[in-house]
Amino acid sequence: MSEQITYKIWTVCMVQKGDEVLLLNRQHDDFKGFIPPGGKVDFPESIAEGAIREVKEETGLTVRNLVYKGLYEYVNPVRKKRYMIYNYITDDFTGELIEHSKEGKPSWIKISEAMHLPMQHSIRRRFPLFFEEGTFEIHVEWDEANNREGDVSIKRT
């Protein structure tokens, strides 16, 4: 008998303009801090389509020519859940930046200054990897008993 495993898929899309990136100042729920646009992929859209839609909804910009940068995943062996976040970067966009979205105020931030801002740990961990050659895979196993991250592996390809 096979066990039931829950899979959830999200995207993140780093939008770059010269030496700046577009980040949202998210100040609600348990995930506060500066984050790139992104969110849940709606079935049956493709993962890249989900990333494009999320950027449009959260920033007003239309992005193209996404470059896949890597996978960030959380697995919870106790609850049989796997959360997969597909990460992209692009510098190809059109449109006007909206003033505010439900996810937070979008702002252009210098790449060199971004790591000094309040940022979720998972975003901080992968932020520099967006600007390196190649792709990455980050695998985080959740420690259910202690309600925190357990083993973490980071692979660059």
Image (spheres, helix red, strand yellow):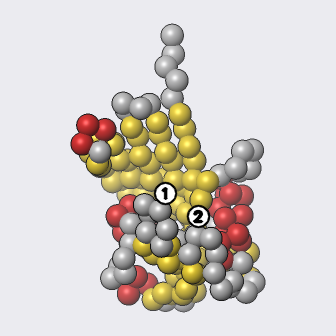
Q: How many marks?
A: 2
Residue at 39% from the left image edge and 52% from the top image edge: 138
Residue 123: tell me if it is visible: no
Packing grade of label 2 (10 A; few <14, some 14-19, many >=20) is many
> Badges 1 and 2: C-beta atoms under 8 Å apart?
no
Q: Position of residue 117 (x, y in %)?
A: 37, 81
Q: In this rendered view, identify the residue nearer to me: 31 or 73.
A: 31
Q: In this rendered view, identify the residue nearer to me: 32 or 37.
A: 32
Q: Position of residue 139 (x, y in %)?
A: 37, 47
Residue at 52% from the left image edge and 23% from the top image edge: 4
| Amino acid identity at mark 1 | Gly
**Up-down: is 89 above or below 145?**
below
Q: Position of residue 127 (x, y in %)?
A: 41, 70
Packing grade of label 1 (10 A; few <14, some 14-19, many >=20) is many
Q: Nearer the viewer, mark 1 or mark 2?
A: 2
Give the CA distance from mark 1 to mark 2.
14 Å
- Dividing the picture into quarters, in which one does residue 34 lie? bottom left
- Under tag 2, what secondary structure? strand
Residue at 71% from the left image edge and 78% from the top image edge: 60
Residue linked to disc 2: 38
Q: Position of residue 44 (x, y in %)?
A: 75, 44
State the residue lying farthest toward the left: 146
Residue 119: tell me if it is visible: yes
State the residue lying farthest toward the top: 1
Q: Which of disc 2 and disc 1 is earlier in sequence?
A: 2
Q: Is residue 69 left or right of residue 45?
A: left
**Up-down: is 84 above or below 89?**
above
- Under tag 1, what secondary structure? strand
Q: Is residue 99 left or right of residue 16?
A: right
Residue linked to disc 1: 70
Residue at 55% from the left image edge and 85% from the top image edge: 107
Quadrant into which the C terminus falls: bottom left
